[in-house]
Image (spheres, rainbow, N blue to C red):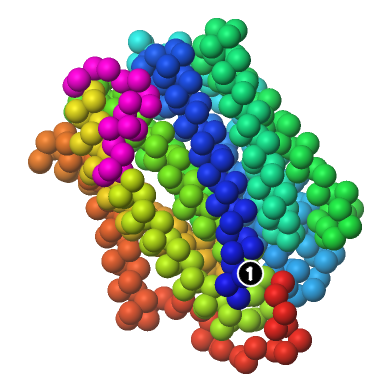
Amino acid sequence: MNYLFIKYLIPSLFGMILMAINILVDGLFVSHGVGDKGLAGVNIAVPIYSVILSVSLWIGMGGATLYSIALGQNNQHRAKEVFTHSIILAIATTGLIIVFCLLFEQPLAYLFGANDSIISYVDSYLHIILLFGLVFVIENILSIFIRNDGNPTLAMLGLIVTSVVNIILNYLFIFIFRWGVKGAAYATVIGTFIGILILLTHFLTKKKQLGFVRTKLNFSIVGSTLLIGFPSFIVEGSAALTMVAFNITFSHFVGETGIVAYAAVNYMHTVFLMLFIGIGAAIQPITSYHYGAKLYKRMKEFIRIAIITGLSLGIAVFIVGLVGKGLMIDLFGIDVPQIINYTRIGIVYFFAGYLFLGINMVFVEFYQSIKKTRVAIWMILCHSIILFIPLLWILPSLFGPNTIWLVFPISEGLTLLITYLALKFKWIELVPREMPELPKSQVNQK
């Protein structure tokens, strides 16, 4: 049982670590090669890109959950129907969003927190990312489904290639060709496209069950995909909303010092967040399959292991923040004393949130993977909107601008407390109440 979890966890974590390094290197290259305003400009543009990614995650995670459940039920035709619908739906939906964003590119940039001094950097990066937005969508969908098709190693390899190519091209385009933030955007696009080519080799393997089938539009599949995947959309969408809200709040209470400090901290947050997403990505195929096969006792054991993993990782990241805050700031080449001091405070306060984030992420992914979407959505809304937005205004208004950094740990901690109470008083259940004995025919691992 532990082996099966590790089989999915290690490739997932390793892939996410590389993606995190990829994101960090983007920030470092832009910071050193373009400057503080370039870093802030890219940070403003990222939430708009995140909206597109959130839709692809919505469809990808919803479809992948249905796919693994169908495999658990030994219904391969249904699984292929789900994959076919997911690809078409993702391309059509995100395509429309991209066209809208291109038509209203600059107004969106100002809406998401840009000002006149950094708008040119936002536009330069954002335009290229939007033009090639479907590349990111296709890679994301393929990676999710290939992981659910029992090939997490190839999904990891795709991320490795994407990251390595992006890092190399970032250096060439920014420092050699002097393309500025446009170079960072082109490097990301090209790296992602090559990653897709790696993922497509899955369809040449003999063990693959993934594939397209000729099928009519099935509203049941579309509806179930959108319903089950909705928590993933909220997770990514709320992350974009969080970035925008933080940028606006820092701009209001602190000014450009706050925007630059948050840009540095947020890059580090994005790096560490990938690790917690990796744990969720590892547990989703396993729990969806076991849910479809009604192996509830094993499913409960997997969630226990994932919670321990999430808590351990959260403690480790918090310690890294305490010990390495100076090194993190130095990485971005920030040399303004006021910004350095404010960023130091931010790292210590903000990183306390990781003590709770890992467990919250596991619960969200688990409930989504077994089609308990209402519970997953409630948890996400609780820490990202219901608690987060009021705290973001109340804390700095009453206790000063330094407390903006505490909004993240307080909202995450309160969400975990509410979830614990809900489980304790049986307002929600961890696994279905019917707990059949483990069938001998399904003792073997997936």
Nearer the observer, 25 or 61: 25
Residue 74 showing in the rendered view: yes
Q: Residue at x 62, y 92 (%)?
A: 437
Instruction: Count all numbered tags in the image, as a single digit.
Output: 1
- Mark 1 secondary-structure assignment: helix
In this view, 293 is above or below 225: below
50 within the magenta span: no
Instruction: From the viewer's perspective, tell me whether residue 22 is left or right of residue 411.
Output: right
Instruction: From the viewer's perspective, tell me whether residue 284 is left or right of residue 327.
Output: right
Q: Residue at x 32, y 81 (%)?
A: 425
Looking at the rendered structure, the kind of residue marked 1 is Leu
In this view, 291 is above or below 357: below
Name of the residue lying farthest toward the bottom:
437
Horizontal and vertical percent for residue 393?
Answer: 21, 40
Quadrant (top left/top right/bottom left/bottom right) for the N terminus: bottom right
Horizontal and vertical percent for residue 273?
Answer: 44, 46
The secondary structure that most of the magenta stretch takes on is helix
Horizontal and vertical percent for residue 158?
Answer: 69, 42
The residue pinned by badge 1 equals 4
Nearer the observer, 78 or 11: 11
In which quarter of the view is residue 261 placed? top left
Q: Residue at x 52, y 78 (%)?
A: 300
Q: Which residues are magenta?
A: 321-338
Residue 217 showing in the rendered view: no
331 within the magenta span: yes
Instruction: From the viewer's perspective, tell me whether residue 355 is left or right of residue 279.
Output: left
Quadrant (top left/top right/bottom left/bottom right) for the C terminus: bottom right
